[in-house]
Image (cartoon, rainbow, N blue to C red):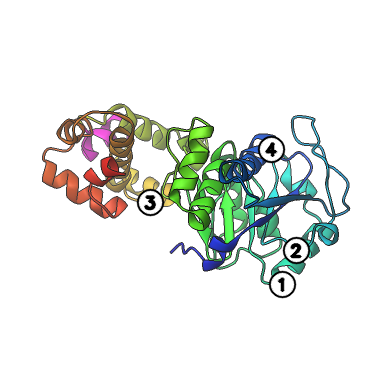
Amino acid sequence: MKRESALMSSIAHIGFLTLPNYSMIAFTSAVEVLRMANYVGRTEHYRWSVITPDGRPVQASNGLTVKPTQTLAQSGMPDVLLACAGWQVRDYVDAQLIALLRKVDAQNVPLGGICTGAYALLAANLLDGFQCTIHWEDMSPLHADYPDVHFADELFVIDRTRLTCTGGTAPLDLMLTLVAMRLGQAHAAQISEQFIVERIRGSSDFQPIPVDARVGFSRQELIEAVRLMEANIEEPLSLDELARLVSLSQRHLQRMFKRFLNVTPTHYYLSMRLRRARDLLRNSDASVARITARCGFHSPAHFSKAYRLQFGHAPSSERHG
């Protein structure tokens, strides 16, 4: 179970440990939230340091570099250190980097990774016993390499003293969540308004992972079954219809879902429909009754019960939020 540490609400100095070929959009999405937090608050709520093991700038995947950079000794120990990575992350996690991360961990400083930065923590055995997330392109092979680590599908995960986040603009949502924990939801909302962000995504939001990335291109029947589910939300197909359309027995289809997605086809389909319902509740003016029908539920009572079990609250609370 993911747990937010009290340490997270006191973070004021963030260290960004940049690895070669790191994702510039992920890095700047995080940094810009901190800058805007200071701007709207009219005071220095946050400061940040760009850190490399030797203090010299490294090139991002877009060919640009960020200055100034410092060594950890020059920056001083931050309140949290986030490894920022991108392409070919395995090529840049060496003994020097692992030693740096373990040194920070020995000081009881929270650690994290954005985009593929979680790999650095995995290689240093610093995610054992924690939940984590990473960009979906790297999740499948890492499942095989680290079978004892629980990888979550969410955009970001805060688990005690570990913060891991996917790529793209997801670090913006992670940082807005940290701002809300320290300075309040109103302050975070002001920042999102400045960025013209319609909604702050939370840790319960999933990163959209193509099913072929989850299971591999060789599992065409499973990929086709999921695509059929996606195309039939309002009038869900039965398990018998799904199996027949992909030319498998129901039993074989059940086994494939369990093996590659760790869930039954029925539960996977239900979760898909409920996530679609949540998107509609948050981003449309359709009535709850209309959304109930559009997502394949025959009664509001059934929809409300399933929604509570999935997300922990009633559908109507999405509108209140």
Q: Earlier in the sequence, mark 3 or mark 4?
A: 4
Q: Would you say the residues marked 2 and 3 are in contact, meaning their CB atoms lie under 8 Å apart?
A: no
Q: Residue 102 occupies which quadrant of the picture?
A: bottom right
Q: Residue 206 occupies which quadrant of the picture?
A: top left
Secondary structure beneath dot 3 equals helix
Q: Would you say the residues marked 2 and 1 are in contact, meaning their CB atoms lie under 8 Å apart?
A: yes
Q: Which residue is mark 2?
A: 77
- Label 2, label 3: how far apart the Cα atoms are: 44 Å
Q: Amino acid at mark 4?
A: Ser
Q: Would you say the residues marked 3 and 1 are in contact, meaning their CB atoms lie under 8 Å apart?
A: no
Q: Which residue is mark 1?
A: 107
In this rendering, the answer to whether 68 lies above or below 9 is: above
Can I make out residue 154 in this image?
A: no
For label 4, the crowd category at 10 Å Cα-Cα, with few meaning under 14, some 14 to 19 and many 20 or more, is many
Q: Amino acid at mark 3?
A: Lys
> Horizontal and vertical percent for residue 256?
39, 46
Which residue is drawn at the image coordinates 15% and 34% (left, top)?
A: 289
Q: Earlier in the sequence, mark 3 or mark 1?
A: 1
Q: Which residue is mark 4?
A: 23
Q: Which residue is mark 3?
A: 258
What's drawn in magenta, residue-wise?
Answer: 236-247
Q: Quadrant of the N terminus?
A: bottom left
Viewed as shown, does residue 261 lie left or right of 85? Answer: left
Q: Amino acid at mark 1?
A: Gln
> Which callout, 3 or 1, points to the residue nearer the camera?
1
- Label 3, label 1: how far apart the Cα atoms are: 41 Å
- Label 1, label 4: how far apart the Cα atoms are: 27 Å
- Label 2, label 1: how far apart the Cα atoms are: 9 Å
> Which callout, 2 or 3, points to the residue nearer the camera?
2
> Horizontal and vertical percent for residue 49?
75, 51
Can I make out residue 276 in this image?
A: yes
